[in-house]
């Protein structure tokens, strides 16, 4: 497995979970019978989960070779499910991210 594949896998997991939170936040008020309970309990709990997923994505997406924080780079550069193709090297350790993970 390459460093890019490992980073893409982590990014996909966080992106899918964040998208699920957004969809639940939009759909929940329409399927609930009591709108006050729906907004008070459901929306705030989904907002909390969404907030922790965003923070988690920034801190838990790390380079598998050097453990450098790739969260901001990975989440904001590229498509929603993959790291930007023009990124070739880890800014922390200098490893080519298209090569196998060193030491594995």
Image (cartoon, rainbow, N blue to C red):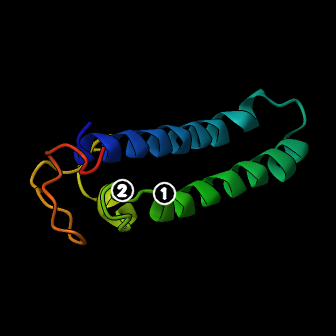
* Distance (Cα) linking label 2 and label 1: 7 Å
Image disc number at residue 17: none
Furthest residue toward bottom = 92
Dot placed on the residue nearer the N-terminal end, 2 or 1: 1
Against 65, residue 17 (above or below) is above
Q: In x, y percent, where is residue 66? A: 32, 64
Q: Is residue 80 visible?
A: no
Point 80% across, 48% down: residue: 39
- Labels 2 and 1 touching (C-beta < 8 A): yes
Q: In x, y percent, where is residue 89? A: 14, 61
Circle 1 crowding by C-alpha within 10 Å: few under 14, some 14–19, many from 20: many
Q: Which residue position is annotated with label 1?
A: 57
Point 38% across, 67% down: residue: 69
Image disc number at residue 75: 2
Q: Nearer the viewer, residue 73 or 35?
A: 73
Q: In x, y percent, where is residue 56? A: 55, 59
Q: Is residue 73 left or right of residue 54?
A: left
């Amino acid at each position: 497995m390459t460093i890019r594949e490992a980073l893409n896998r982590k990014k996909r997991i966080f992106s899918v979970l964040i998208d699920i939170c957004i969809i639940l936040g939009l759909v929940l008020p329409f399927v609930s019978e009591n709108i006050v309970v729906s907004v008070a309990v459901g929306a705030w709990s989904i907002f909390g989960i969404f907030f922790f997923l965003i923070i988690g994505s920034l801190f838990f997406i790390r380079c598998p070779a050097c453990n450098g924080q790739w969260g901001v780079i990975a989440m904001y550069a590229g498509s929603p499910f993959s790291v930007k193709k023009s990124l070739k090297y880890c800014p922390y350790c200098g490893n080519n991210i298209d090569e196998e993970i060193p030491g594995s």
